[in-house]
């Protein structure tokens, strides 16, 4: 592991100033992603800026919006009674991710910035455009069982690993960030970038920008939300396919339908085609199948991951059936 300098920020202003003084420095919070990638030599900054003591650990429930501080641990958030009542899919997604020990350390902001679990990304001798731009993509002709069928390019087909971000995507979350140009709020659907021909740029964050938190609008859809995850083993594994779904139910008809998919796409995938199919309709098995088929029309399976097409159909069906049962 390369030597690096460590700086601790006591305030948000300190953190931003440290990033200005040390271009290329990285923020460190719970460390559940960053420390691994530093050890493995994937990240090679000169300086890490520890933001673990910043006052960003509160969940504030307002009249119309709930704000979650960037340093709220995943476990605290998952078991927060207000989150469980108002955003059940969010709690379910968090509890389906990682282990209890990791959830105790992992933070809200860090979860959003998790890096892909593509094995070639962490293998320094492998071609990987995301880690080393311009070197190629070993996964295209390599072992690509875990890779994306939606949103990929000829430069990268890595999936985004976060369960939390999938639920946030279905719940219309906004990410609050602060940087040299001031504060801004980014809809989560605009926060992540599909790989295109620049897979190393994963989000719209500018260098040095700090995530302050996540804001979630209150809605009947959000209260009536559900998350389903399918993985190779129940104890601790990333999604092969997942679905976060939400809808208001009025006289048996679904309105304000929200669908997001995980484990199958290069970014947390807002499934607009499926939403349009479901909107204003009465739930039924045939409707769920039609929603999945419409979303899957653009799928591009690779050599080892064609199984994700029927798996996603079944996962979405299970999530929508679960939602219907809640009503
Ligand atoms: Fe790298 Fe993406 Fe290819 Fe994986 S899929 S090897 S992360 S470029």
Image (spheres, rainbow, N blue to C red):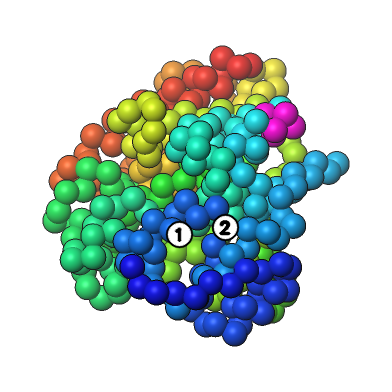
Q: Residue at x 47, y 51 (%)?
A: 32
In which quadrant of the rendered view does residue 65 lie?
top right
Picture coordinates of residue 54, whole percent (x, y): 70, 60
For residue 64, side relative to residue 238 (left or right): right
Give the numbered dot on residue 15: none
Q: Which residue: 22% across, 39% down? A: 306
Residue 83 in magenta? Answer: yes
Q: x, y percentage for residue 122?
A: 29, 58
Marks 1 and 2: in contact by CB < 8 Å?
yes
Residue 85 vertical position relative to residue 215 in the rendered view, above or below = above
Residue of label 1: 34
Return the residue nearer the eye: 317 or 131: 131
In this view, the residue in front, 311 or 249, is 311
Predominant SS of the magenta segment: helix
Residue 114, placed above or below residue 241: below
Which residue is rendered at x = 45% and y = 78% of the image? 46
| Disc 1 element | helix
Image coords of residue 213 (percent x, y): 68, 55
Residue 29, numbered circle: 2
Position of the N terminus, as image quadrant, is bottom left
- Is residue 212 covered in magenta? no
Decide if residue 180 is on the left or right side of residue 130. Answer: right
Residue 278 visible (yes or no): no
| Residue stretch in magenta | 80-84
Q: Position of residue 3 (x, y in %)?
A: 39, 74
Q: Quadrant of residue 124?
A: bottom left
Which residue is situated farthest in the bottom direction here?
A: 21
């Amino acid at each position: 592991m390369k030597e690096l300098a460590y700086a601790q920020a006591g305030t948000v202003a300190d953190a931003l100033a440290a990033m200005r003084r040390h271009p290329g420095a990285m923020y460190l919070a719970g460390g559940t992603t960053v420390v691994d990638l530093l050890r493995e030599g994937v990240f090679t900054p000169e300086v890490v800026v520890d933001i673990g003591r910043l006052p960003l650990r509160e969940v504030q429930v307002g009249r119309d919006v709930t704000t979650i501080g960037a340093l709220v641990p995943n476990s605290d958030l998952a078991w927060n009674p207000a989150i469980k009542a108002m955003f059940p899919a969010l709690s379910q997604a968090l509890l389906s991710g990682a282990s209890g020990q990791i959830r105790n350390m992992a933070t809200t902001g860090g979860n959003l910035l998790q890096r892909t679990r593509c094995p070639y990304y962490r293998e320094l001798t492998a071609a990987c455009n995301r880690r080393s731009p311009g070197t190629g993509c070993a996964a295209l002709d390599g072992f690509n069982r875990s890779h994306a069928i939606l949103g990929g390019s000829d430069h990268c087909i890595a999936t985004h690993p976060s369960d939390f971000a999938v639920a946030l995507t279905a719940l219309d979350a906004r990410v609050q960030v602060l940087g040299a140009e001031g504060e801004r709020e980014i809809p989560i659907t605009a926060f992540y970038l599909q790989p295109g021909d620049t897979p190393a740029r994963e989000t719209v964050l500018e260098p040095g920008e700090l995530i302050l938190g996540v804001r979630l609008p209150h809605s009947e859809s959000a209260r009536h939300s559900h998350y389903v995850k399918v993985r190779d083993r129940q104890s601790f594994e990333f999604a092969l396919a997942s679905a976060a779904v939400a809808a208001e139910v009025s006289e048996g008809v679904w309105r304000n339908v929200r669908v997001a998919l995980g484990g199958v796409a290069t970014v947390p995938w807002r499934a607009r085609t499926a939403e349009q199919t479901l909107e204003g309709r009465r739930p039924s098995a045939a409707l769920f199948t039609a929603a999945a088929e419409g979303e899957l029309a653009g799928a591009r399976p690779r050599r080892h991951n064609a199984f994700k097409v029927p798996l996603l159909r079944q996962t979405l069906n299970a999530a929508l059936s679960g939602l219907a049962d809640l009503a």
